[in-house]
Amino acid sequence: MMHWRDTRAAGDIARCRPAGCAADDHTGPMTPLDRASRRQRHATPTKHYEVGMNEPTRQTTGDLSERRGPNRRRRAPRSPARQRGSLAIIAAIAIGVVIAALGAVDLGNLFYQRRALQSIADLAALAAAQTMDDGCAKPAATAQSAALGNGFDSTASGQSMTVVCGRWDVKDNVGPSFFAGSASGAAAGSDAQLNAVQVTVTRAVPYYFLGAQRTIAATSTAEATNVGAYSIGTTLAQLQGGVANALLNGLLGANLNLSVLSYQGLANARIRIKDLMAAANVGTVSALLSTQTTVPQLANWMLSALSQTSVANADLQTSIGALQTIVSANIPGGRTFTIGNTANSAGIFSIGLSNPQAALDATFSPFDALLVAAEIATGQTAFSLANGLNIGGLNANLQVQIIQPPVLGIGEAGIDPVTKTWRTIARTAQVRLYLNIGLGTANLPLGLLGALLPVQVNLPLSLQIAPGQAWLQSASCTASPSTCTSAIGVQTGLTNLCIGDTPANMSASLPFTCSTPATLVNVANLVTIKSLVSFPADVPASQTPTLTFYGTTGGYQSTNSNGVGSVLGNALSGLGASLQQTQISLFGISLPLGPIQTALNAFLGGVLPPLLSGLDAAIVPLLQLLGVQVGESTIHDMSLTCGVSQLVY
């Protein structure tokens, strides 16, 4: 580093070298040469290095005035005007910063109040949706109470609340909220099932610095879907007498021999949809509905779901044991089918929900599902029941043809305002039954002819039962499960019954006909007695009653109507009067009726009464296991799952 060392004294300035200053000291008068030498020496600074220093020390000669120099420019001091302008700019910037800070405080408070208001709206909507009723009386009061509990009084000055009941439906309503109020739009109408509540709250928030106040609003929509699950046709009372074993063995080609208690355990058991999803290793309800499966695989999935279920089942071990027996019975795989029912393919479940995920907690009966699956897998090929049936002490051969399988209903109540149809519908099967009842020959005076030749006396019957249906009309949940209600409307199926021979072509695509005369007596195919007139018996469409179920665990109810036997009795009552049209043939040649008419009338009069009385006892249980009923409808309300409210917008 350079150092300047000033050794001037008494007006005499001299530069000293490290060696000393003796040569420069002049005590006498200075000569002109000395002055010139001195000026030359002082004109240019000379660098000197001090011993022990890392950097050179710069020293200069000359007095202070010479070092500054007469020509050196000095900065002029600022004027007062320029100083005042600088202060104004600084003050303006500071004021802007202060205003921005104060505005940030107001805006921050505004966003905080908006967030708090949104929380109030969310909680009020969730509470209101949980108490949804048809008249929207409870949701409004519940929302007010929930908001008040969170510090929001809608009656206070500057605050308000609006509660609107309606329907949230991603299929029928317009986004982004997919909500339509009950007063207008898709949710209007007495049959529209309300499932959502929209709550709007407003509050006047004062500004601290930016003005008077500003009104902010928050809107929240919550929905809670009540899901019903039910079937039509099957009852516990029809599981007696081994009919279930005979039917399942005929449908599946198996050799099951389950007890009545096992079938009752399966009928009483409940499986959640989400448990079946876990067993099938799918993540959504939609994926489950589109899954292809077979009857053995479905039985295995239901066994896994039932073994791990948390649903309370009274006969859990019995139902698990029954499914284990079915799984280990080596049932042939058969045809595959989808679990969900569509317009193009038959399935087990018909889901009437705009959001299928709402069916996660819905429960169903494994027995009903197994029967429906067996009927779907069988297809439209006619099959015979092993060992036939016993009707009034008479043997009967029976062939069953399933034209359309039944379907279980799971979904919401009400009418879809777009399609104008019920959202959730369960349907019975459409089947054809062909019976050939052997009447015996004990009371028929055949004489020597009966002793020498085999004689067959039969009554061939054909039935076609069109599907009935049941729709979920309304579903209401309350705080107490015992007071929850499900209202299900019922339409019984139409029945065509005739006395006539089984048609040669049993194609399901052909319409049901009653044009083939009944062969009543056949003697070794040599002598035949045929009725020339078929006897159609129609069960007309009855009224559509509504059955109301209480509670969430389900039950059974039936509509009042006539059974098969009484309907058939009406058809057979004209049999005797029509026998004058009966034809006797010998080797294909028509013969006069003669005295055989009197004997045949007496014979039929003795065998028909027990036949008619036993027809209901034998046929009705079989039909109900198939999901078919004639002239009546039995509803199996499996469950009502009350929805847990959730925010949707």
Image (spheres, helix red, strand yellow):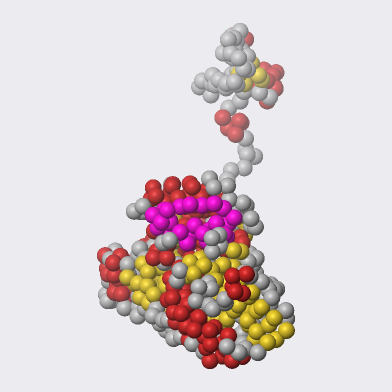
Q: Nearer the viewer, residue 333 or 422?
A: 333
Q: Quadrant of the N terminus?
A: top right
**Number of marks in the rendered image:** 0
Side (left or right) of 371 relative to 380: left
Q: Position of residue 67 (x, y in %)?
A: 61, 30
Q: Residue at x 61, y 85 (%)?
A: 531
Q: Position of residue 613 (x, y in %)?
A: 42, 76
Residue 229 inside the magenta-drawn segment: no
**Vertical arrangement, residue 169 with respect to residue 99, above or below:** below
Q: Nearer the viewer, residue 434 or 289?
A: 434
**Vertical arrangement, residue 220 with respect to residue 336, above or below:** below
Is residue 207 at all visible to an observer of this figure? no
Side (left or right) of 416 relative to 585: left
Q: Residue at x 56, y 62 (%)?
A: 385
**Vertical arrangement, residue 409 with respect to residue 98, above or below:** below
- Magenta region: 242-267
Side (left or right) of 70 relative to 107: right
Q: What secondary structure is the stretch in magenta mostly built from?
A: helix
Q: Residue at x 60, y 89 (%)?
A: 594
Q: Position of residue 310 (x, y in %)?
A: 39, 50
